[in-house]
Amino acid sequence: MLLDSEMEKLFRTLLTKDSAQIYFCGSNLLICIIDNASKLSVTTPVYFGNDYIPKSVRQCTENTPPFHSDSIKTFVTIDGDQVTLRYLGKIDPLNNYKFRELLTEFCYMAEKWRDYLDEHDKKDLLRVHVQ
């Protein structure tokens, strides 16, 4: 949980540098201000493929997952050897409380995606029976 002082520091960093990296609710978040300070981008990795992303994981990113958020819209992308959860939205309606809620919901969705992709990752494992 971010304290009010940490939120203020984060806002100041975003105003001066247009981006900030924070650790929040179990996720490493990259937060960026884009499009002439009209939009907010939040990203976090949800799957690391170690130079390879299995077919079952790739298929998961193309299908609608069995979970969703009513409050924010997110999407996933495959970036090299990792899958990244992304949020892109307008800055206008954000205040301290709404921003904290957005980050909390985003991290919740990231955790759901991690569990979902890890579950499907296991489908590509080869089963070896030892006698």
Image (cartoon, rainbow, N blue to C red):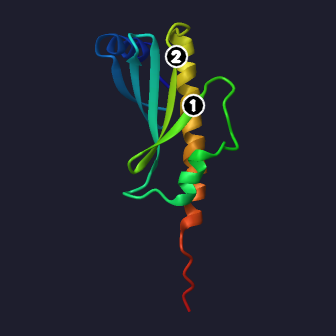
Q: Secondary structure at mark 2?
A: helix
- Pick out the residue farthest to the left: 17
Residue located at (41% from left, 58% from top): 52
- Residue 65, percent from left and from top: 66, 43
- Within 10 Å of disc 1 (Cα), the crowding (few <14, some 14-19, many 20+) is some
Q: Which residue is mark 2?
A: 99
Q: Which mark is residue 38?
A: none
Q: Amino acid at mark 1?
A: Thr
The quarter of the picture where residue 129 lies is: bottom right
Of callouts 1 and 2, the N-terminal one: 1
Residue located at (50% from left, 59% from top): 54
- Residue 104, percent from left and from top: 55, 27
- Pick out the residue farthest to the bottom: 131
74 left or right of 33 in image: right
Q: Which residue is mark 1?
A: 74
Measured Cα–Cα span from mark 1 to mark 2: 15 Å
Residue located at (43% from left, 55% from top): 49
Q: On screen, 2 above or below 12?
A: below
Q: On screen, 131 above or below 16?
A: below
Q: Secondary structure at mark 1?
A: strand
Q: Amino acid at mark 2?
A: Phe
Depth order, front residue of 100/37? 37
- Residue 57, percent from left and from top: 54, 54
Q: On screen, 87 above or below 91?
A: below
- Residue 123, percent from left and from top: 59, 64
Q: How many marks?
A: 2
